[in-house]
Amino acid sequence: MTDSVEEMAKNKDELQQKANELKEKRNQLHLKSKKLADERDSLNSAIRDFRNKISEHKMKRDELNERVKHAKQQRNQLNKSHNDIKKQIENLEKERSSSLGSNLNNLKKQLRTLENEQMTQPMSPRKEKKLIETISDLSKKIKEQEEVLNKDPRLKKAVEEEKIIKQKAEKQHELVEKLATRAQEEHESMIEIIKQLDNLTKKITTIQETIVETKIQADNVHKEFIECVDAIHDLERKISSTQEKKRKTKKVEEASTAQKEADEIFERFKRGEKLSTADLMTLQKAGLI
C-alpha cells in the first residue's frame, strides 16, 4: 500500500509540473494574443486616419478640378477673343496694304524664305551679296509699311487690344496648368495613401488570423491544463483515501495489540501475580479493572 501511495504522489508531482508548464504556455499565448490585439487596434486607428486623409485629398482634388474646368472655359473664351482680334488686325492690315500696293504678310513671308535660303544653301559671293541686298530692301520696306500701319488709329487700337488679350490668355493658361498640377498632386497623394491603406488592411487581416489561431492554441492548452488539474485532484483524493484507510488499519492493529497485552496482564492478575503501575494502567485503559 505504501508503494502505491508513493507512486501516486510521484505521478501527482509530475502532473503538477506539467500543469505549471501548461499554465505558463497558456498565459504566454494570452499575452501574445493581447499584444496582437493592441497592434491591430493601433493599425485600425491608423486606418481611420488614412481614410480621413483620403477624403480630404479627394475633396481638394475635386475642388481643384472644378476650378480647372472653370479656368479652361475662361481661357478658351480668351483664346477665341484673341483669334478674333488677330483676324481683325489681319483684315485691317490687308485693307491698309492694298492701299499701299503690297501685302505686309506676304513681304514678311518672302523675307523669312530669303533668310532661310541664305543660312541653308551654298552660293557664290556675288549671289550672296545680291541676296543680302534683297533682304535689306525687304526689311526696309516692311519697316516702312509697319510705320505706316502703326499710324492707323484703328489698327493701333486693335494691336494694343491683341497684346492685352494675349497676356490675359497666357496668364489664364498658366493658372489652368497650376491648378491642374495641384489637382494631380492631390490625386497622387490620395492614391499613395490608398496603397498604404491596402497594405495596412492586409496586415490587419494577417494579424487577426494569427489572433484567432493563438486563441485556439490557448484554448487547447487551457483544456489540457484543466485535465491535468482534474487528474491531480483525483490523485489527491485517492492518496487521501488510501492514507485514511492505512491510518484506520494501523489504529485497529494497535488496538488489537493493546487488547492482547491487557488480556495477558489480566490473566497474570487472576493468578495473583504482582502487577506494576504500568500494568495497572494498561488494564485500566482496556476497561478490565
Image (cartoon, rainbow, N blue to C red):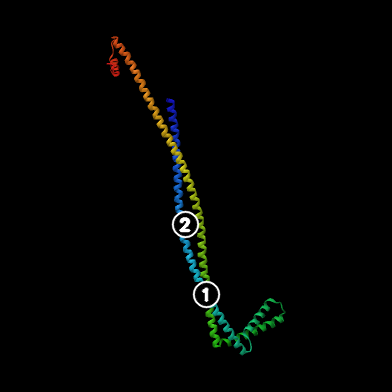
Q: Position of residue 16 (x, y in %)?
A: 43, 35
How many numbered discs? 2
User: What residue lies at 44% left-to-right and 30% top-to-bottom?
Assistant: 8
**Picture quadrant where residue 257 is located:** top left
Q: Residue furthest right?
A: 124
Q: Position of residue 219 (x, y in %)?
A: 46, 43
User: What residue lies at 50% left-to-right and 55% top-to-bottom?
Assistant: 201
Q: Nearer the viewer, residue 152 or 268?
A: 268
Tag of residue 73: 1
- For the question of whether residue 209 can be seen, the reply is yes
In the displayed structure image, the side of residue 149 where residue 119 appears, left or right:
right
Which quarter shows the C terminus? top left
Q: Nearer the viewer, residue 82 or 285?
A: 285
| Residue type highlighted by circle 1 | Gln
Q: Residue furthest bottom?
A: 99
Distance from disc 1 to disc 2, alpha carbons, whole Å, reads 39 Å
In contact (CB < 8 Å): disc 1 and disc 2: no
Q: Secondary structure at mark 2?
A: helix
Q: Which badge, 1 or 2, comes first in the chain's sequence?
A: 2
Q: Secondary structure at mark 1?
A: helix
Relative to 269, is 128 above or below? Answer: below
User: What residue lies at 45% left-to-right and 31% top-to-bottom?
Assistant: 11
According to the picture, the residue beneath numbered tag 2 turns out to be: 47
User: What residue lies at 64% left-to-right and 81% top-to-bottom?
Assistant: 109
In the displayed structure image, the side of residue 230 where residue 198 appears, left or right:
right
Q: Position of residue 35 (x, y in %)?
A: 45, 48
In the displayed structure image, the side of residue 114 where residue 262 appears, left or right:
left
Q: Position of residue 9 (x, y in %)?
A: 43, 30
Relative to 20, is 190 above or below? Answer: below
Label 1 crowding class (10 Å Cα cut-off): few <14, some 14-19, many 20+? some
